[in-house]
């Protein structure tokens, strides 16, 4: 009878719509359900019996601000169980991240002795059945906002696969720079959102221009320079993105005043726009484009240094160069 019960319990874990991960006391993964495989983009055979931090986080236990990347690992090492916390998971380098509500708790033997830690993840994009009404309203709002952001990202990617991956990497770089510069949580989150949608105005640019293998004509380049204004116009229709609009509008301004569309200079340019400019240029230089191959990393770094104080805010460049070692 006990064997049947254990079989049913395993089937229940396998059938859960969100990831479930269990580690032993050494932090090694002893169980990952089907939803966990899909969320992390792995097969369980590849990660079972491996340390969680190596299997999912490339050995990096903490993020740039010294916070645990894994709530399961945090519970294991600090003894603190989490009744619910929001976490973002990205399965593949260019996949859209998903928001999860995470619960962690200790797994105990019948004797009460701790045997490991379990983490249960509920996808906020799908689940609305949260227990407390106040928490429900707050998390649904967050989920809907992220759905809007990723809808924009997918709309861009549908026309230009390069731009899709580019926006996601720019968002990641922008968030890291904002963290390195000591900005608050709100600004860090805003930097990421701005990165995701900064090129949304390219929806209005013909694919023949976006994907042109050679140099652009003067008329074609002039068309491209309209995308910050088009993007700002599109985003201005969504009330909760009001803080994003001026950042997107100014992300092609230059520190020396030679940018577009308004010719802003220095600190006239919003700080997040100056951050986006560096993140945007770095990814553009280090990615294959329709008209050239990716530049080697040392060359891209030298270009950032060479244009600091001209195209780019030198403080933003300095902050990015300090963290560049964590990105390669």
Image (cartoon, grey):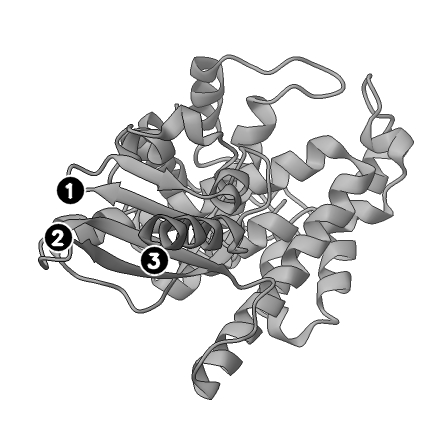
Residue at figure coordinates x 43%, y 84% from the top left: 132
- 327 and 323: which one is in front? 327
Number of the front mark, 2 or 1: 2
Q: Is residue 57 left or right of residue 291?
A: left
Residue 9 picture location, percent across and down: 40, 54
Secondary structure category for the residue under label 2: strand
Q: Is residue 145 left or right of residue 177?
A: right
Label 3 crowd bin: few (<14), some (14–19), many (20+), radius 10 Å = some
Please report whichever mark, 2 or 1, sits nearer to the chain's N-terminal start.
1
The dot on residue 183 is 3
Q: Do the CB atoms of the residues marked 2 and 1 lie less than 8 Å apart?
A: yes
Please report whichever mark, 2 or 3, sits nearer to the chain's N-terminal start.
2
Q: Quick check: can you spot residue 67?
A: no
- Which quadrant, please, contains the N terminus? bottom left
On screen, residue 70 above or below 268: above
Q: CA distance from mark 2 to mark 3?
A: 39 Å
The dot on residue 25 is 1
Which quadrant holds residue 327?
top left
In the picture of the structure, the residue carrying the numbered disc 2 is: 114
Q: Residue furthest front?
A: 1
Which quadrant holds residue 148?
bottom right
Label 1 crowd bin: few (<14), some (14–19), many (20+), radius 10 Å = some
Number of the front mark, 2 or 3: 2
On screen, residue 234 above or below 318: below
Residue at figure coordinates x 41%, y 65% from the top left: 186
């Amino acid at each position: 009878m006990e064997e049947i019960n254990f079989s049913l319990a395993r089937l229940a874990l396998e059938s859960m719509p969100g990831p479930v991960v269990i580690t032993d006391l050494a932090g090694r993964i002893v169980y990952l359900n089907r939803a966990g495989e899909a969320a992390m983009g792995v097969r369980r055979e590849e990660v079972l019996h491996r340390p969680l931090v190596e299997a999912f986080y490339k050995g990096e236990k903490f993020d740039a601000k010294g916070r645990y990347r894994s709530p399961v690992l945090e519970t294991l090492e600090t003894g603190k169980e989490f009744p619910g916390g929001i976490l973002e998971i990205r399965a593949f380098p260019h996949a859209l991240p998903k928001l999860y509500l995470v619960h962690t708790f200790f797994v105990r033997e019948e004797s009460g002795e701790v045997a490991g830690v379990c983490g249960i993840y509920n996808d906020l994009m799908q689940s609305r059945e949260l227990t407390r009404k106040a928490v429900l309203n707050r998390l649904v709002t967050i989920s809907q906002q992220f759905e809007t952001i990723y809808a924009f990202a997918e709309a861009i990617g549908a026309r230009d696969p390069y731009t899709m991956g580019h926006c996601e990497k720019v968002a990641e770089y922008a968030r890291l720079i904002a963290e390195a510069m000591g900005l608050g949580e709100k600004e860090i989150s805003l930097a990421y959102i701005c990165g995701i949608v900064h090129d949304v105005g390219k929806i209005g640019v013909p694919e023949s221009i976006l994907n042109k293998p050679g140099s652009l004509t003067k008329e074609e380049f002039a068309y491209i320079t309209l995308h910050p204004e088009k993007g700002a116009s599109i985003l201005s229709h969504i009330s909760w993105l009001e803080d994003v609009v001026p950042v997107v509008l100014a992300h092609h301004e230059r520190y020396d005043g030679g940018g577009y569309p308004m010719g802003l200079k220095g600190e006239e340019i919003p700080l997040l726009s100056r951050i986006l400019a560096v993140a945007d240029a770095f990814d553009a230089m280090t990615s294959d484009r329709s008209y050239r191959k990716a530049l080697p990393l040392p060359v891209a770094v030298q270009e950032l240094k060479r244009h600091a104080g001209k195209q780019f805010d030198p403080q933003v460049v300095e902050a990015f160069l300090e963290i560049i070692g964590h990105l390669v």
